[in-house]
Amino acid sequence: MANLDSIVSLCKRRGFIFPGSDVYGGFAGTWDFGPLGVMLKKNIIDTWWNYWVDKRDDIYGVDADIIMNPRTWLASGHTTTFADPLIECKACHGRFRADKLAQGLNEHVTDNEFTRLHIKCPTCGQEAWGPIRMFNMMFKTHVGPVDGNESIAYLRPETAQGIFVNYRNVIDSCYPDIPFGIAQQGKAFRNEISPRDFILRDRECTQMEIEYFVHPDTWETEFEELLKETDIFLEKEMGLSVEKINHVEVPEKDRAHYSKRTIDFMFQYPNGEEELMGLAYRTDFDLRNIEHESGKSMEYRNKVTGESFVPHVIEPSIGVERLFLAVISDNWDEEKGILHLPENLAPYKFCVSPLLKNKPELVKKAEEVYKLLKNKYTFVTWDDSGNIGKRYRKQDEIGTPKCIVIDFNTLEDGTVTVRNRDTAEQIRVKPEEL
Ligand code: GAP
């Protein structure tokens, strides 16, 4: 398994991910995607959308605003319950998430439980803790030119609520048969107390979520169905190693306030097993609360039976950054310096080079091949720097599955060398056959 430092270094060296606001020394919990990172991230996002929305008839897309009416967060419970236990060291004034300072603690840890463990401050080594306070993780902002309490709004902490507030609009405009889903991809913001492990826990992340609306009597079957589909997505579309994914049934005391059943998909990351995504049964919690807050009915009327009811919801929710880190760490061979990305996710599908850059006849032919492939596949790169060995090493590091080299034989028989990233095998083919 690759170690996290080598992945952070690969990501910076090859333009996948940079520390946020790097030129000013960074900004905790923020990361910027570079030219190659954007391509890999986009491939992940597009593949998810294609798999869950484009290829299915029962899931509709929305793209809601990040800043929503603050009543959204009253109804969803985030204003009161979206909080982590914060503890401060009175000696060095370091602030930490109390439940992350020792094994076996959860978000509801009490002062007594914490004190009994005689935990030392990770920064100064003292045991001088203040009381545990619940710290709300929503980022506040002000909307409009007034700065008072009445102008407070929040950056959304989950994309899910952008779906729930549009549930009625989707029904009234698209008339879906139940069960049906609404999907959204977009930014979510959390003022994490301790962002950590590279892009695993960020203050700004990108979520891909589906709220799948079902008849209350069928939630168990639909839950199992979505569980199966999610496994297929992670294994077949993202190419993740099955043995690194572990389904964990979340006990009641650890579940989010809205959930009656949650399965966490844990992944074996370089720093140990961590949550990659969750599948939650949110019951009718959100739609009922919206009904209460807005005074509008959230009932669905079955077109065939005429039955009216408030649907229950199953939610597969995944963060792009966690998926990105899973994909890159699962595929990075540190010893050989090869990023074995699945072809559908690799930023570039081909790299084209002339064997020697000082031979105009090779360069001219290579440019022709480059144009041919670029027109056909778009994601094709050109490299005539250094010697051919160096070029292969660079392309291996960024996960380009195939390198095409134009040499003197090309001028005679029209064939080019195709080198396979994973096996280093080389074959000769005509470029038109690629
Ligand atoms: N709508 C449900 C929801 O937001 P969550 O378990 O809080 O549930 C869902 O978040 C997923 O979003 C997580 O499994 C993870 O993939 C991603 N995620 C959440 N917080 C994150 C953070 N601070 N940094 C990166 N990804 C995060």
Image (spheres, rainbow, N blue to C red):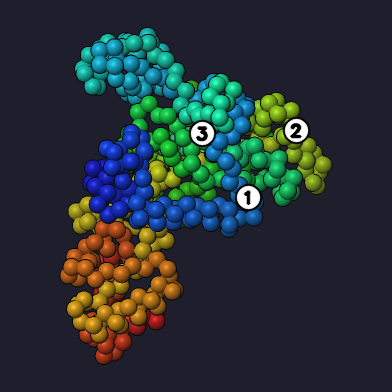
Type of amino acid under label 1: Tyr
User: For the residue labelled by badge 1, is the local secondary structure a helix, a strand or a loop?
Assistant: strand
Badge 3: residue crowd in 10 Å (few <14, some 14–19, many ≥20): some
From the top left corner, tell me how far across and down residue 37 is, in percent.
36, 52
Marks 2 and 1, how far apart in space? 21 Å
From the top left corner, tell me how far across and down residue 392 is, in percent.
23, 66
Type of amino acid under label 2: Ser
User: Do we see residue 416 in this rendering?
Assistant: no
**Corner quadrant of residue 217:** top right
User: For the residue labelled by badge 3, is the local secondary structure a helix, a strand or a loop?
Assistant: loop
- Label disc, if present, on residue 197 of the rendered structure: none
Q: Are marks 3 and 1 in contact (CB under 8 Å)?
A: no
Q: Is residue 202 above or below residue 375?
A: above
Marks 3 and 1, how far apart in space? 24 Å
Q: Is residue 115 above or below residue 292?
A: above
Q: Nearer the viewer, residue 148 or 111?
A: 148
Label 2: which residue?
A: 297
Label 3: which residue?
A: 155
Marks 3 and 2, how far apart in space? 26 Å
From the top left corner, tell me how far across and down residue 355 is, in percent.
21, 77
Q: Is residue 367 rendered to the left or right of residue 167?
A: left
Label 1: which residue?
A: 60
**Corner quadrant of residue 146:** top right
Type of amino acid under label 3: Leu
Q: Is residue 47 rendered to the left or right of residue 328?
A: right
From the top left corner, tell me how far across and down residue 50 is, in percent.
53, 56
